[in-house]
Image (cartoon, helix red, strand yellow):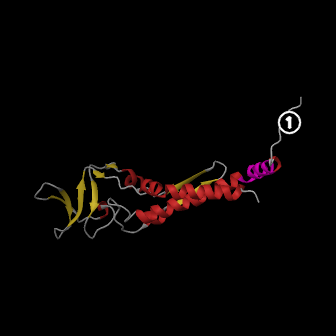
Amino acid sequence: MNLQLVVMGAREAAEWARRADGNLEAGVVDGLTRGALLVEAAAKRMIYAGHDDHLERKTGHLRQSLTHRVDGPGLYAEVGTNVKYAAIHEFGGVIKPKGHPFLSIPIGARKGSPMQYKDLHLATTLKGQYVLVDEQGKVQYLLRRQVVIPPRPYLQPALEQSEEKLSDAMTAAVWKAIEPK
């Protein structure tokens, strides 16, 4: 007795599989790009006002520096920035001086390093805080042995906020690339 198995639609399924094989990577890259753009946009929205612990905006440089990159061959996407102080705001941490006993924090009209000003003098406040004052007695810099920066995340919450839309964008892009025509 011969046993014969007939699969209905096998030719169509084989054609769909061939098409998927050639287009799947392009669909994934498109999905990654769409997803990265969603996360980048969410991070830019929430960095200065998107949650209770948001950063205070001064120049907007950190927000403007947020960008994305998609690695097609590696099939991954990154959203972030190359700004030096970005990580300390995302994760928090302790900043300590390098090569000096104190960090100098400008609070007056002076900007930059206090080393460039010859008229500054060390003083202490009534509470024992070290400060640098100018010749008129105006406090120009606070001096601190360290500063604790609390975490004020913007990338991780943006990813979490975008998770469902990101999944939908990836699914739609991949399906569009491999759907039978």
Return the residue at label 1. Answer: 4
Q: Quadrant of the N terminus?
A: top right
Q: Is residue 18 above or below residue 113?
A: above
Residue sitting nearer the eye, 143 or 68? 68
Q: Nearer the viewer, residue 10 or 5?
A: 5
Q: Amino acid at mark 1?
A: Gln
Residue 104 lies, in percent from the top left, at: 28, 57
Q: Quadrant of residue 105?
A: bottom left
Q: Position of 165 compared to 95: left or right?
A: right
Residues rendered magenta in the picture = 12-23
Picture quarter containing residue 32? Answer: bottom right
Q: Residue furthest left?
A: 126
Q: Please give left or right for residue 109 compared with residue 39 in the image.
A: left
* Residue shown at 26% from the left, 49% from the top: 101
Q: Quadrant of residue 31?
A: bottom right
Q: Position of residue 62 (x, y in %)?
A: 43, 63
Front residue of this view, candidates 136 and 40:
40
| In the image, farthest residue toward the top | 1
Most extreme residue toward the front is 1
Is 128 covered by the magenta stretch?
no
Residue 171 place in picture, x, y as percent: 61, 55
Pick out the residue farthest to the right: 1
Q: Residue 3 appears at what percent x and percent y?
A: 86, 32
Q: Residue at x 69, y 55 (%)?
A: 26
Q: Secondary structure at mark 1?
A: loop
Neighbours of disc 1 within 10 Å: few (<14), some (14-19), many (20+): few
Quarter occupied by the C terminus: bottom right
Report the side of 136 relative to 55 (left or right). Answer: left
Q: How many marks?
A: 1
Observer-nearest of 154 and 34: 34
- Magenta portion: prevailing SS class: helix
Q: Is residue 13 magenta?
A: yes
